[in-house]
Amino acid sequence: MSDAWWTGPMLANSAATLPPGHFLFEPYLYDIRSPGADSFGSRTYILYGLVNRLSIGVIPVFGYNHVNNGRSSSSIGFGDFTLQAQYRLTEFHPGSWIPTTAIQLQETLPTGRYDQLGDRPSDGLGAGAYSTTIALNTQTYFWLANGRILRTRFDLSGSFSRAANVEGVSVYGTNAGFRGTVKPGTSFYADLAFEYSMTQRWVLALDMTYSYNSNTRVNGVNVQEINGLPYAQNVTLNSGPSEAYGVAPAIEYNWTSNIGVLLGTRIIFGGHNTVGTVTPAIALNVVY
């Protein structure tokens, strides 16, 4: 096992947990490139081994949206904030077929701006709703014919959100006179990832992902002024279901078994009701 050091692939979460009293710090910097816009952001995993088999942590997010045909974000903003706990069920041992498996629970808090955006919709960096994600993470190792190690992760997760109030211009496409509610749809996500240890320090990684999101529904009233008088109109917006496929090739370099860097690109090919994106990213992984 000491023949290979890892940072982890770009997207798939680890099924391992930290030893009690140890920290993991992993900041990502990225640029989500889509037609007509760039969404620059940072996402940082800060995890702590609380007791044997159990790690807890937080994931703060910051962002800035640059729009080609419109007004970009007024400043760097704080996105939604996630709390995380992971409990390890089993642990891989060389010579055994049993992988490392873990149950992960995340609760995302609506701390990012999402409505009352005025003439800067690009200031929207959040979803506005509390969201719960439950995941099953797995990880195992294979020794290849050349003696090198292939590490494999397969993660499955589902998310559901509560309803939220929406006022004015929002990330959901409402305008200044809108008052109502939004109910984000449930989602499903799968990630199969491989890491090939070329040497002890250098690793090639690849994520292959699938995601599905059910319909998001917005209900409310849009108030406009016509001939000096307020006029209210009922509004219902449905996003419809969507699905997307993606890959994320990356390369890892590890200075030690506890410190490494990853450089990769996530490519979303699009799918039903989904816009394709390209997201270059860099991450630093530190465990101590």
Image: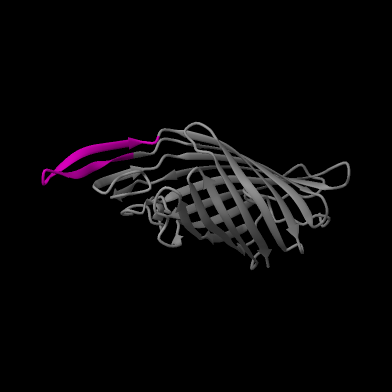
Q: Toward the viewer: 21 or 250?
A: 250
The verdict on residue 224 being magenta is: yes
Q: Position of residue 64 (x, y in %)?
A: 47, 57
Q: Quadrant of the N terminus?
A: bottom right
Apparent side of residue 120 relative to residue 79 in the rendered image (left or right): left
Apparent side of residue 170 relative to residue 287 in the rendered image (left or right): left
Q: Position of residue 58 (x, y in %)?
A: 53, 61
Magenta stretch mostly in which secondary structure? strand
Q: Position of residue 23 (x, y in %)?
A: 63, 66
| Furthest residue in direction front, as rendered | 69
Residue under the point 25% across and 46% down:
178
Apparent side of residue 111 relative to residue 102 in the rendered image (left or right): left
Residue under the point 37% across and 51% down:
121
The verdict on residue 205 being magenta is: no
Residue under the point 61% across and 45% down:
266
The picture quadrant where one finds residue 286 is: bottom right
Highlighted magenta segment, given as a residue range: 218-239
Colour scheme of the picture: one colour
Q: Toward the viewer: 168 or 25?
A: 168
Apparent side of residue 26 relative to residue 175 in the rendered image (left or right): right
The picture quadrant where one finds residue 288 is: bottom right
Residue 130 versus residue 227 in the image, above or below: below
Residue under the point 63% across and 48% down:
265
| Furthest residue in direction right, as rendered | 146
Residue 147 versus residue 29 in the image, above or below: above
Residue 15 visible somewhere in the drawing? no
Residue 7 visible somewhere in the drawing? yes
Q: Position of residue 206 (x, y in %)?
A: 69, 44
